[in-house]
Image: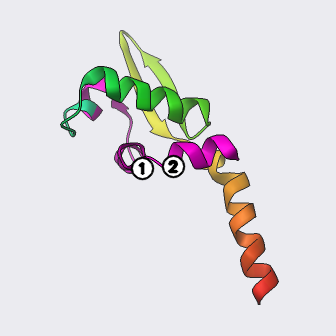
Amino acid sequence: MDLTLKALSEPHRRAILQLVAFEQLSAGEIAEQFSISRPAVSQHLGVLKAAGLISEERKGTKRLYQTRPEGFTDLRAYIDSFWDESL
């Protein structure tokens, strides 16, 4: 869960997650949405992938990224535990 929280602590990574929540995008397509360099976007994608929050699929020469909802399971259970205890 620490990797998940660290990944979510950076605004660009949260924005990337929103971009790839409903469609697969390449790193180039993601980079077009930001005023940061492509290498910076690639680093952010690496952090998100290491945390299990996005998946990478190869199609031809492209690598496509998409959010992995199951990557949020532990974090959601942790947050839900606070609600369960307070209710």
- Is the residue marked by circle 1 packed among few (<14), some (14-19), or many (20+) residues within 10 Å? some
Is residue 25 inside the magenta stretch?
yes
Mark drawn on residue 59: none
Residue that appears at 62% across and 36% down: 52
Residue 23: name its quadrant.
top left
Identify the secondary structure beneath mark 1.
helix
Quick check: is 14 in the magenta stretch? yes
Residue found 63% across the figure and 51% down from its top: 72
Nearer the observer, 78 or 6: 6
Compared across the picture, whether 57 is left or right of 74 comes to: left
* Figure label count: 2
Residue 66 horizontal side relative to residue 26, left or right:
right
State the image coordinates of residue 68 (x, y, percent, origin top left): 56, 42
Residue at 74% x, 75% y is 82
Can you give x and y, in whole percent of width and height, for residue 83 in the image?
72, 80
At label 1, the amino acid type is Arg
Q: In this rendering, is residue 70 above or below 44?
A: below
The residue that label 1 is drawn on is 14
**Residue interval drawn in magenta:** 1-30
Task: Please state which amino acid type lies under the numbered disc 2.
Answer: Leu
Task: Return the residue at label 2.
Answer: 8
Marks 1 and 2 close (CB-CB < 8 Å) = yes
